[in-house]
Image (spheres, helix red, strand yellow):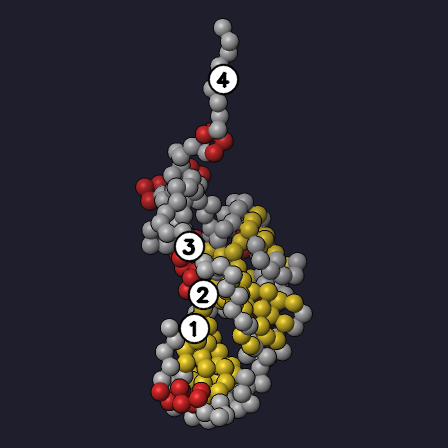
């Protein structure tokens, strides 16, 4: 049930409703932005919502009570607030979106909290973007608890893995690139093939500064990324590269990191193929 203050009830019951919709976006990096359909700035919950942007909430399409994608936010990339580079850099992943109804004539009246959601899938088409919103119901559809997998679920160096990342972290200068999804750094050539696979590369300088991507494969100093960068990689860029782990008990946890006792997977769980095998019985 939506809580409406007496002041807002009076405003809604008046002959002329002086109301507007306000959207507040809170990114994980601490950046907070506000948007409104009104023609002047409107303050709400300590955030000044600016007019003139194309971001608007869609109607809720609640076709399934447990649906993850129950609404959307659409907007234009020509806005100074939301750029394609920031979206590509992952700055809006899982950002919190708050929806309010506000009296623009008297912002001191408590706003109506229409709801909140997290940004999930992001689509870009031309100069338009669409943020798919994950409502509170989405939490009920998540798997709770651990799964019995052959591979280790821990991230290399996290609190459960506890491998020291200091000797596995390297800074290097980009010597060559194919544009936006691969780079070559001679300083990394001495490491064996796929030493950095499933690891990360972070840009410390250049057009991609602040961007972080996961490495798909590595060999002879060449790193191939799973996802392209928001801007072109250039020779001379400085990067910080951290080795990765494929989650294998024998080849990774034991052989590479000597960390078998903290392995989080179940290497002896039979595979589906093994479970479906039938006895090879020969007629006597």
Query: How far from the left and from the top, in percent, is residue 257?
Result: 39, 44
Can residue 257 be seen by looking at this rendering? no
Residue that carries the numbered disc 4 in the rendered image: 280
State which tag comes first along the sequence, 4 or 1. Answer: 1
For the residue carrying disc 4, how many other residues have a C-alpha within 10 Å: few (<14), some (14-19), or many (20+)? few
Q: Are the two marked residues, 2 and 4, in contact with CB atoms closer than 8 angstroms?
A: no
Distance of mark 4 from mark 1, alpha carbons?
60 Å
For the residue carrying disc 1, how many other residues have a C-alpha within 10 Å: few (<14), some (14-19), or many (20+)? few
Q: Are the two marked residues, 1 and 3, in contact with CB atoms closer than 8 angstroms?
A: no
Residue that carries the numbered disc 1 in the rendered image: 115
State which tag comes first along the sequence, 3 or 4. Answer: 3
- Between label 2 and label 4, give the one nearer the viewer: 2
State which tag comes first along the sequence, 3 or 2. Answer: 2
Question: Image quadrant for the N terminus?
Answer: bottom left
Residue 256 position (above or below residue 84): above
Q: Are the two marked residues, 3 and 4, in contact with CB atoms closer than 8 angstroms?
A: no
Residue that carries the numbered disc 3 in the rendered image: 142
The total number of labels drawn is 4
Query: How far from the left and from the top, in percent, is residue 163?
Result: 36, 50
- Between label 1 and label 3, give the one nearer the viewer: 1
- Between label 3 and label 4, give the one nearer the viewer: 3
For the residue carrying disc 2, how many other residues have a C-alpha within 10 Å: few (<14), some (14-19), or many (20+)? many
Distance of mark 2 from mark 4, alpha carbons?
52 Å
Residue that carries the numbered disc 2 in the rendered image: 135
Q: Nearer the viewer, residue 166 or 134?
A: 134
Can residue 269 be seen by looking at this rendering? yes
Residue shown at the point (61%, 56%) measured from the top left: 182
Q: Are the two marked residues, 2 and 1, in contact with CB atoms closer than 8 angstroms?
A: yes
The numbered dot on residue 133 is none
């Amino acid at each position: 049930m939506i809580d409406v203050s007496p002041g807002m009830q009076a405003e809604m019951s008046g002959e002329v409703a002086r109301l507007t919709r306000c959207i507040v976006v809170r990114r994980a990096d601490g950046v907070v932005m506000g948007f409104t359909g009104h023609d002047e700035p409107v303050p709400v919950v300590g955030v000044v919502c600016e007019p003139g942007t194309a971001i608007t909430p869609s109607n809720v399409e609640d076709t399934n009570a447990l649906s993850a994608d129950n609404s959307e936010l659409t907007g234009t990339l020509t806005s100074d607030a939301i750029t394609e580079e920031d979206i590509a850099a992952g700055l809006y992943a899982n950002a919190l979106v708050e929806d309010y109804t506000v009296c623009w004539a008297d912002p001191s009246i408590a706003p109506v909290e229409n709801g909140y959601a997290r940004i999930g899938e992001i689509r870009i088409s031309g100069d338009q973007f669409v943020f798919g919103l994950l409502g509170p119901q989405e939490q009920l559809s998540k798997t709770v608890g651990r799964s019995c997998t052959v591979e280790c679920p821990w991230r290399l160096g996290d609190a459960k893995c506890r491998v020291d990342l200091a000797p596995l972290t390297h800074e290097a200068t980009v010597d060559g690139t194919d544009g936006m999804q691969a780079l070559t750094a001679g300083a990394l050539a001495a490491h064996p093939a796929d030493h950095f696979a499933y690891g990360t590369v972070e840009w410390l300088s250049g057009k991609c500064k602040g961007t972080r991507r996961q490495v798909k494969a590595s060999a002879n100093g060449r790193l191939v990324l799973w996802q392209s960068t928001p801007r072109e990689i250039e020779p001379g860029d400085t990067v910080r590269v951290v080795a990765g782990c494929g989650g294998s008990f024998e080849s990774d946890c034991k052989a590479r990191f000597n960390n078998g006792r903290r392995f989080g997977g179940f290497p002896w769980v039979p595979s589906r193929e093994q479970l479906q095998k039938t006895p090879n019985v020969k007629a006597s």
